[in-house]
Image (tube, rainbow, N blue to C red):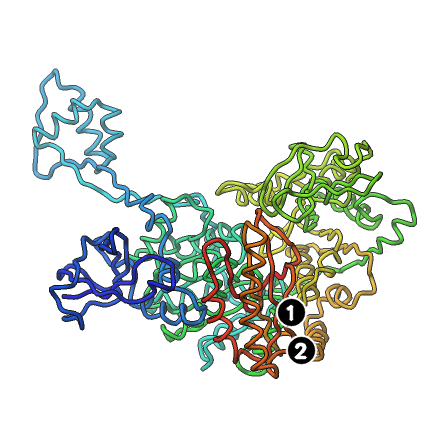
Amino acid sequence: MVAEVIVDIAHSDVDKIFDYACGEEICAGMRVTVPFGKTTVTGFVMRVKEKSDFPMEKLRKIYRAEEKFPALNAECLALADKIASRYRCPKALVLRLFLPSEMRTGKTSERYRQIALPCDGVSPVFSANAKAQAAAYAFLEEKGEYDATLLREQFGASAVKALEKKGYLRFEKRRLLRAPFREMVGEQVERTLTPAQEKAVLRVEETQKTVTLLHGVTGSGKTEIYLTLIAEQLKKGKSAIFLVPEISLTPQMLAQLRARFGESAAILHSGLSAGERFDEWCRLREGSAKIAIGARSAVFAPLEKIGIIIIDEEHDGSYSSETSPRYNTFDVALLRAKYNGCKLVLGSATPAVETYRRAKTGEFELITLPDRINRKPLPDVTLADMRREVRRGNASAFSLQLREKLEECLEKGNQAIIFLNRRGYSQNVLCTACGYVAKCEQCDVALTYHSEEDCLKCHYCGTKYHMLSGCPECGGTHINYVGTGTQRVVGELKKLYPGARILRMDNDTTSGKEGHFRILRQFAQKEADILVGTQMVAKGHDFPSVTLVGILDADMSLHFPDYRSGERTFQLITQVAGRSGRADEKGEVVLQTYDPENTVLRFASKYDYLGFYEHEIAMRQATMFPPFAKIVRVMVTGTDEKETLDGLKRVYTKLEKIYAEHAEEFLFFHKMHAPIKRIQNKFRYQVLMRLLDGAVLKEIYACVAEETGKNVLIYVEENPSNLS
C-alpha cells in the first residue's frame, strides 16, 4: 500500500504530495511520522492507494501512526485544497486549523482513570480482622462503581488490593474528560416561538438559497430561532456549528445550549486549557458531542453530517483572521455548508454593508425581525453635546444628562452599563512643557497609563514601563494625563456614587479562562450596580435589570483612517444601546458626543439601519470602495529596517509590472509606511491597492510568494478588517 502524505512543514517548497510505503493500518486522515530528508517529521495522509508512479523499492516507509484513528475526516481533506487555493497558502497550514495545536506538539493527550467495580456472582466472607476490606466492599457495592484512587485513599491501598486478589472487585480503565465550564448550565425553560419566529424558522428551512441573513433588532429573539434550527437538525441525526464573535459570549451561549441539548454541546476556543480543548475536540470528532460552539476557529470543528452553521453577530471584525492563513470565517463556513448541503445562517442587528447588499440583491435569503420579542420599544437615545458641557466648565467624563439618569437608575435599584472603547486610566501621558508623549520602545504607539498598577502599558505588545517621574526630553515635571480610559471612568464613578458597586470589564480584568464569565455572572446576579467596559459589554448579553446605557466618546471611532469607520461606529452604538430595557422597564441611552450633527450618529440614535445602509452604500459606490471594489494590501514586516525596506522595494518592483500591464484594473496603487510604523519591534511597510475586481489577485499572490524570505515577512490581505 502507498500513502500520499503532506508533510507538516509550512513552506511552499515542500507543499506537495510525497509517496510513502505503508501497511493496511494506515488510512486517509491519519497523522503519521515519516522520514524526510535526514530528519523525521509528522505528516497528514491525504489518500491511500495500491501503487505509486515511483518504483516501490525506492519508497521510504511510514514509521508509525500518531493516533489509532484518522484525526482528519473526509471533509477536512476535501476542503484543504480549496482553502489553500483560496488563500494561497501551504496545505499544511490549512490542515493544522482542523486540529488542536496541542495535538500537533504532543503537549496533551487522552487522560484515563481507574474505576473499581464489585465482581458479579461473588458472596464475600470477611474475617473479624478484615474490617477495612468489609467496609470498602460494602461501600463499593452501594455505589456500584467508584474512582479507584479515591477508594484507596478512603479505605487503604492494602484493603483494596486484598479485595482484588480475592476476586471481590475488578478495575476498569475509563477515559477522563476535562469538561470546561461544568457549572454553565442554564435553566430549562419551555419557550413558545412567536409567529414571527416560527415564520423565520420555516423560511430558513424552505429556502433554496444556501445563505440566509437574519436581520433582527437587539432583543428580537434571534437566539431562540438558532436553537430551534439546531434542534431540528439534531432530530435528523445531524450536527451543528454555532459561532459567536467574542470569547466572553461563549459561556453564556453554552449555558443555553446545555440547558436545551445537555452534553451534546462542546465548546472550542483559545481560552480553554490545553487538556480541555483537546477533550472537547475529541468529543466532537468521535460524535459524542454534536454541537460545536465557539469563536472564529470553531468553524473548523471536526464534525460530520453538518446540518446547519450559524454565525451570530456576523458583522464583527473578529471573524477575520489576522495570522496566516488569513481566512474569513464566512468563506470557510460557506465551503462547509456547500460540502454538507446544509444552510448557513448569518445573524445581526447591524449586518455588514457588504452582507446586506448581497441579501438585498437576492443572493442571500433576507429575513427581517423589526420588533423586540416582548413588543417593548427600543430604548430612547439622548444625544449629549459634550461641547456644551465643556463650555459649562464640566471637565468630567460624564455629561449632566448622564449623571442625572445614573442617579435615577441607582435610586430605583436598577443597573447601568457605561461603555467606553478604551481601557486604562488615560489615553497617553504628555509633558506640557515640551510636548513629549511617552511611546513604546517596540511599537510606534503612545503608552497608556494604568493607575492600579501605576505603570505605562503598550496595548499592542503588552510591555509595561515605570511611570515617569519627569520628562526624559526636557527634564520637566509637568506630566499630564490626556484622554480617558475605563479605569479612570471607574475612579470618577466611585467619587460621584460612593455607595454604588462597580465592575470593570476589559482586557485587563478578564485574564484567565473564566475572567469574562466571572464578571458577567456577578453582574447578572446583581452583585454590582454599574458595569464599565469596552466593546466586550456591547454584544449579546441579556441583563433584565439594565435600564440605562451610557456611551462615552461615541464619535471616537468615527475618525479612524478606515473606510469602515462610520459603519463600525453605527454597529457599536446600536449593539451597546440594545443592552438597555430588555425586560419590563423601558430602557434609556445617553450617547455623549462632540459631533451631535454627525449623520452616522443621527442614524444610530434612531436605530435606522436602512437609512444608514442607503447613505453608506451610496458613499461607497461614489468613492468606489468595497463592495464596489476590492482593497488589497501587501504587508512587509521585519526586525531590521533596512532589510524590511529592501523587501518592500523588491516586491513593489514586481507589483509595478502587474500595475503597468493591468492599469485599467487599478483604482489606486501606492507604497508607504503602515499607519502604525512599528509593532512588537517589527517595522511595517505596505503596498496599498484598490482593484475593480480580483482579476489580478492571482498574479499579486504569486509575486509575493516569490519574495517572502527568512528575515522579512511579506503577505497579502484582502479587504483587511484592520487597516492600521
Q: Which of 199 and 12 lies nearest the eye of the viewer?
A: 12
Q: Amino acid at mark 1?
A: His
Q: CA distance from mark 1 to mark 2?
A: 17 Å
Residue 187 appearing in the image: yes
Which residue in the protein does label 2 denote?
Answer: 624
Q: Secondary structure at mark 2?
A: loop
If the image is split into quadrants, where does the C terminus sit?
bottom right
Q: Nearer the viewer, mark 1 or mark 2?
A: 1
Q: How many marks?
A: 2
Label 2: how many Cα within 10 Å (few below 14, some 14–19, many 20+): some
Which residue in the protein does label 1 denote?
Answer: 670
If the image is split into quadrants, where does the N terminus sit?
bottom left
Task: Reply above or below: 408 against 595.
Answer: above
Specify which label sits upstream in the sequence, 1 or 2.
2
Q: Amino acid at mark 2?
A: Met
Residue 301 appearing in the image: no
Tell me where residue 683 appears, x and y as whole percent. Answer: 59, 53
Disc number for residue 481: none
